[in-house]
Image (cartoon, rainbow, N blue to C red):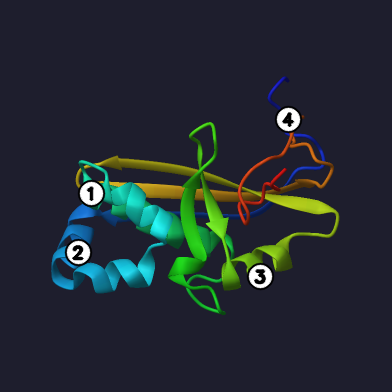
Amino acid sequence: MANAAPDNLMILGIGNDLIDIRRIERTLERYGERFLDRVFTDVERRKSDRRNQRAASYAKRFAAKEACAKALGTGLNRGVYWRDMGVVNLPSGQPTMNLTGGALARLNEITPPGMTAVIHLTLTDDQPLAQAIVLISAVPATGQSATGQPTTGVPGSGLPVT
């Protein structure tokens, strides 16, 4: 099989979250900047504030943080905070997570020696719902992904910057 996973691919965690976009709309109306400052990174705010469907954009990012915290096995606990996880896009446009602080520490803790963590993220919305699924896998730390492609990415995404 051309798309079969190699024997040395390891799943470290999986998480998903489903949220009602209207809940985020109400939270934005009620708490505004206080909510945004507490939960979202500057990159996420710039991207979402440019969107026509602003609340849906924030809802997808909120769901991604919840899903990522679940995939890390901590939830929003054990030193993992909202702003430690941010949705970013690879040069291809593919979304992934940039981890810092406690979230990055936890990722490093669950990644076996000699392996590199890779964070896979998918986002979707269909009013009134937004969903995110996060899969954290580990591949040998050889400078190539499980598909044989060079591993390049963003700090904390699990893909080393080259």
Query: Looking at the image, which residue is at 30% across and 42% down?
Result: 125
Classify 10 Å Cα crowding around label 2: few (below 14), some (14-19), many (20 and above).
some
**Is 89 placed above or below 150 here?**
below
> What SS does tag 2 mark?
helix
- Residue 50 figure quarter: top left
On residue 28, which mark appears?
2
Classify 10 Å Cα crowding around label 3: few (below 14), some (14-19), many (20 and above).
some
Q: Mark 3 points at which residue?
A: 105
Query: Looking at the image, which residue is at 72% across and 20% down?
Result: 2
> What SS does tag 1 mark?
helix
Instruction: Give the mark nearest the N terminus, 1 or 4.
Output: 1
Query: Looking at the image, which residue is at 72% across and 43% down?
Result: 162
Type of the residue with mark 4 = Gln
Measured in 3D between alpha carbons, the distance from the residue under mark 2 to the one under mark 4, in whole angstroms, is 40 Å
Classify 10 Å Cα crowding around label 1: few (below 14), some (14-19), many (20 and above).
some
**Is 113 placed above or below 1 here?**
below
> What SS does tag 4 mark?
loop
Front residue of this view, candidates 94 and 125? 94
Instruction: Give the mark nearest the N terminus, 2 or 4.
Output: 2
Q: Does the CB distance between marks 2 and 1 fall below 8 Å? A: yes
Measured in 3D between alpha carbons, the distance from the residue under mark 2 to the one under mark 1, in whole angstroms, is 10 Å
Left or right: residue 94 versus residue 102 is left
Q: Name the residue under label 1.
A: 54
Q: Is residue 63 visible?
A: no
The x, y position of residue 100, in whole percent, is: 58, 65
Q: Name the residue under label 4.
A: 149
Instruction: Give the mark nearest the N terminus, 3 or 2.
Output: 2
The x, y position of residue 47, in whole percent, is: 35, 47
Classify 10 Å Cα crowding around label 4: few (below 14), some (14-19), many (20 and above).
few
The x, y position of residue 83, in whole percent, is: 45, 67
